[in-house]
Amino acid sequence: MRRLLLPIALALLAAAGARANSQFASSALGIGIGPTHVRGWTMGGLGLALGDTLRLSLANPAGPGGCRRVSMSAVYLADRRRAADPGGEIYFTSSGFPLFEFMIPFGSRVALGFGYDEDADIGTARTRVPFGPDEDPAIPHTRYFERKGALFRVPAVAAFRLFRDVRIGFRLD
């Protein structure tokens, strides 16, 4: 087992690091939110395969299939997302710090990954929904909400290379 520690450490610290840029898209309660830029750092050629349930990752979890070396990636959100509805404005901030993923190959056809993800949400809302039956809905009411909390998860990815260019992947959050 001690003989494996050095190759694993060298694979994680290899000079194959590259800046990874991707986009996440979101929608909440039927309100479309534009793409959010994500900044990440990868080692060993691993892309972004893990996402959280609030965002739809445009990365393919089958990408690491056929990965031949231990790889790692780290991702964090880079900007604030905003959305507007006909009744007012909704500002929503979601921070995912951090999102780590480690991918370990087994042979040349199977790769298993695991990660760590933490989410925190903060938001404010301005709406025209009346508080009571006698209130005019045309008068805007400002409602501020702040939901601070963290959700800790250990998501996992299983990627398989069936043939030369045929890959399949699964993600479990």
Image (spheres, rainbow, N blue to C red):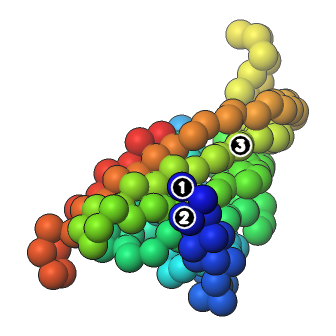
Residue matched to label 2: 4
In the rendered image, the vertical position of residue 2 relative to residue 16, given as above or below: above
Residue at numbered disc 1: 1
Q: Is there any visible trace of residue 94 in the rendered image? A: yes
Q: CA distance from mark 1 to mark 2?
A: 5 Å
Q: CA distance from mark 2 to mark 3?
A: 33 Å
Q: Position of residue 21 (x, y in %)?
A: 61, 80
Direction from residue 155 to residue 63 in the image, left or right: left
Q: Residue at x 27, y 72 (%)?
A: 108
Earlier-in-chain disc, 2 versus 3: 2
Callout 3 touching callout 1 (CB < 8 Å): no
Looking at the image, can residue 55 be seen?
A: no
> Element type at marker 2?
helix
Q: Nearer the viewer, mark 3 or mark 1?
A: 1
Pick the residue in front: 136 or 132. 132
- Provide the residue designation for mark 3: 119
Instruction: Please state if 159 lies on the left or on the right of 46 as rendered.
Output: left
Amino acid type for the residue under numbered disc 1 = Met
Comes first in the chain, label 3 or label 1 = 1
Query: What residue type is disc 3 on?
Result: Asp
| Helix, strand or loop at mark 1 | loop
- Rendered-image quadrant of the N terminus: bottom right
